[in-house]
Amino acid sequence: MSLFPDNPSLAADPYVWRPRFKTFVAGPFDNENIVTRAGIQFGLHSATIRYYQKTYAAVAKAVYEFFMARRGRYDSFAFYDLQGWDNSPAGIIWTNCYVGVGNASTLVFDLTAHNANADANRKIYCDGVDKTANGSWAQGTGADGRDRFTFSTYTPTAGQVITCDFLGRRVWKSCFTTDGFDIAVHDSDFYEITVDLIEIP
Amino acid sequence: MPSLPAYVTAHAGDAQQCVPLLVELLTGTPFRWTTFDRPIYANSHMWTNAAIKVEGLSLNSYDATECQLTLGDQSDVLAALDLSTTKGISGTVVNIWECWLNPVTFAVEATVKKFRGRIALVSIAKDAVKLSIGPYVNLARKPLPRWTVSANCPYTFKDGRCGYGGADVTCLKTWDDCGARNGGSNQVRFGGFRNLPPDGTKIVWKNGDWVLGSSQRTWSGGSRPPNAPPPRSTRGRR
């Protein structure tokens, strides 16, 4: 999977991201009550990235080339959450991030984290039970630079849902939401770009 | 996994539910998908969180006779359905379960069969494959029970009702040809009505009498075919 241009110089301003769920709602009924049904278990995200004012030609070129290589919405890619580009997001601890489902044999799982801080917030759960001590967490050794967890003294059973918590950069599997975008060219070699992307399961 | 009654007892009236669907397409190697955002292990199978949309089924309703599936990941399914020959399209069984998850932990607690049908129509759009699922039992495709009255034997040669086990590989289905097998002993199992005129003989009511029609091919047994009703005038005098 391709990786969205990831460079501190690409940090956008402002960077807007939104968590989202999918809930089916029945009602409101006569007593104003509603009944809800979960469509998904894990939160997904979407983001609007604006390269504004201080964007130079090299940045605009990188984003443009990446967009063209993805053929707009066609191809998915990995995206490292920009809020934690310097590995220290503003106090956000990502919790209940989906990792995978056990099958009684697989021991190695790539996480939705990139270089997560090696602190007490770093946890691995199997069906909600903390199994962090049953393996090792390696930074950036998985696909797309994801962190990788290898179980050594425990094997997730068939159907066990594996999740993780961490402090650091979150990795999304994403795609653009449109097949085109604008590049506004200002004088002094400044460029203005806005791209929307959406996380997919 | 608790039983469904136990689940209902525990969660009846919950304002929150999580009930994704499990979809099984019974091709040679069954496809098993879930509409959820992660794989689900239930009923001793892993259900993949595929790009699939189910329409036409309402939650907690179990009397639907048709629904529609939209598949985003289509190539494997199309190969399995063998579109080139239409074999395997109509009639491929589709089963759908509700997977009742714990509304707090999202663990699988019970599954309940929601729908059983057969693929009735496959349509390929630019963005997805759409399967229209019809009833499991399609009366329009069921042959009605019928009784064939013929001078020829209707049995399949050498099957259990025919009973012949010799070296011959074919027969003419006639009484005489049956008699040529096993020295005539096979005729006790002859399945035709040997006194009827041969197949192809057309008998019509004409001018107050039964006569042979124009399509007669082989029978030449007289002015009336054997066992044909007597002329009305004769019947009246008896």
Image (cartoon, helix red, strand yellow):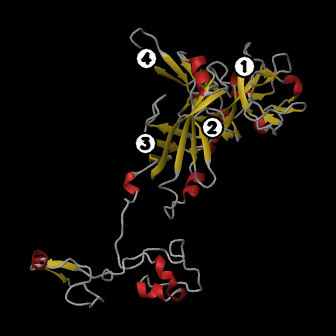
The residue at which mark 2 appears reads as B49
Residue at numbered disc 3: B66
| Residue A121 position within the rendered picture, expressed as x and y whole percent measured from the top left | 81, 17
Is A176 left, or right, of B225 in this rendering? right
**Local secondary structure at mark 4:** loop
Q: Nearer the viewer, mark 1 or mark 2?
A: 2
Residue under mark 3: which chain is it in?
B
Q: Are marks 3 and 4 on the same chain?
A: no
| CA distance separating discs 1 and 4 | 31 Å
Dot in front, 3 or 1: 3
Task: Say which quarter of the image contains residue A117.
Answer: top right
Dividing the picture into quadrants, the one containing residue B163 is bottom right
Quarter holding the C terminus of chain A is top right
Q: At x 61% / y 47%, what residue is drawn?
A: B31
Q: Residue at x 24, y 84 (%)?
A: B225
Residue B99 location (% of width, % of height): 59, 31
Q: SS for tag 3?
A: loop
User: For the residue carrying disc 4, how many other residues have a C-alpha within 10 Å: few (<14), some (14-19), or many (20+)?
Assistant: few
| Letter of the chain that mark 1 sits on in the rendering | A
Does residue A57 appear anywhere in the picture?
Answer: yes
Q: The N terminus of chain A appears in which quarter of the rendering?
A: top right
Measured in 3D between alpha carbons, the distance from the residue under mark 3 to the one under mark 1, in whole angstroms, is: 40 Å
Q: Residue A27 has which mark?
A: 4
Amino acid at pointer 3: Glu
Image quadrant of residue A91? top right
Assess whether mark 1 and mark 3 are in contact (beta carbons under 8 angstroms). no
Mark 1 sits on what residue?
A95
Would you say the residues marked 3 and 2 are in contact, meaning their CB atoms lie under 8 Å apart?
Answer: no
